[in-house]
Amino acid sequence: MYRIITSIIIFSSLFAQNRNGTTSANFIEIDVGSAASAMGGAYVCMTHDVTSIYWNPANIVYLNQNELLLIHEPWIAETNRYIIASAIKIDNANSVGISLNYLDYGSIEVTNIENQDGTGEYYHPKEYSIGLSYAKKFVNWFSFGTSVKYISSKIWHSSAGAAAIDLGVLINTPFLSMTDAQKDGIRIGMSISNYGTKIKYGGIDLLNPIDISSEYGNYGNVEGQFKTQGWELPLLFRIGLSAKPWVSQTSELILAVDAIHSNNNSEYLNLGSQFTFAPSARTKFYLRSGLKGIFMVDGEFGPAFGAGMKYQLKSGEGIKLDYCYRTIWTFDNTHNYTLSLTF
């Protein structure tokens, strides 16, 4: 365990240096899930849903049931995000997952120097990532997980692709447990997200006729091509703690804090809380709040709030509904709804 933790910290310090505005495909660092968003993104230690694939793939091994996640999220600047993910338990020590994260930028009118108000033609930029995840519980208090992803970006007739990997660990401890049970003690989670190849655009939009000489010969129809540089993916290193200062037979309170180091922004903290009330064995209600981007330079995020419920049928299948209201200073505030089915 010590070697794994040390390796993750050293690995992140080597590759996660702060270079603002130097990454591409930044949609893959947008928070995933209403529950996580309502907790301000302090979710690297949370094991309550399949969005763990994004936050920390090691967590999906602790899900009690198989789960299917469906998200449609109206995002800023009239964009829309769609997410489908599922986690399947192989046994009590192994789980696998699959995920699709799709961002639609809508229709944008084509303009050029001669037609500043538009040519009448439209293009539809879009980006997506698709990934496979695996998590293994080595002992009751330690798990490891990884995801491999393919990332694609398309702008008009130009496109780019990249491959990336996520790594994560989760450690359950009995420290400060209100019930002396290990599951109610402090949790420590760490993850590295989006370590991969550079993304480089190519396509017919980069073709341009070149006239290399205006005096000797006719070179006006020689085909040339702009050569673009490769852009790094947004690399994120997260380390977090969560604790349960209140635990009873019908309720519990979770407090969580994550520290994030990225290669395209300053270091910052995320804080979150979740109160769970379970009036019966098959019904749970959640209240959440959080704050994202504490100490972030020029941070754009304000407080977030949310609620949710889970209902399980006698046959074992269940449904989970979560909602988040998130404040963003420059853009409009967002509403996020998440539907999950357990089976």
Image (cartoon, rainbow, N blue to C red):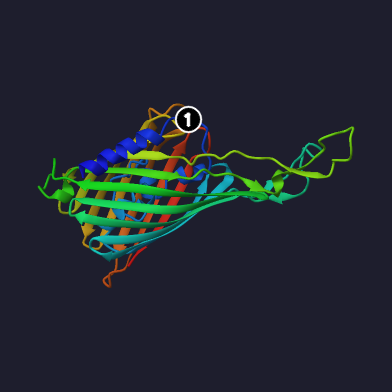
Residue 272 in view here? no
Residue 198 in view here? yes
The C terminus, quarter of image: bottom left
User: Position of 103 compared to 88: left or right?
Assistant: right
Say which of 292 and 283 sits in front.
292
Q: The disc labelled 1 sits on which kind of residue?
A: Arg
Residue under label 1: 19
Q: Is residue 229 above or below residue 121?
A: above
Seen from this angle, which residue lies furthest bottom?
Answer: 315
Q: Quadrant of residue 45?
A: top left
Seen from this angle, which residue lies furthest front?
Answer: 216
Q: Quadrant of residue 61?
A: bottom left
Q: Position of residue 167 (x, y in %)?
A: 34, 48
Give the residue displayed 40% in from the left and 39% down from the top: 236
Q: Position of residue 87 (x, y in %)?
A: 35, 61
Say which of 176 and 231 sits in front.
231
Q: Position of residue 190 (x, y in %)?
A: 30, 42
Give the residue displayed 53% in from the left and 40% down from the top: 24
Give the residue displayed 23% in from the left and 60% down from the top: 93
The N terminus, quarter of image: top left
Instruction: Tell me how many marks there are.
Output: 1
Q: Secondary structure at mark 1?
A: loop
Say which of 68 and 14 sits in front.
14
Say which of 323 and 22 sits in front.
22
Q: Is residue 140 above or below residue 41?
A: below
Q: Residues within 10 Å of mark 1 (few under 14, many from 20)?
A: few
User: Position of 142 compared to 295: left or right?
Assistant: left
Q: Position of residue 157 (x, y in %)?
A: 68, 50
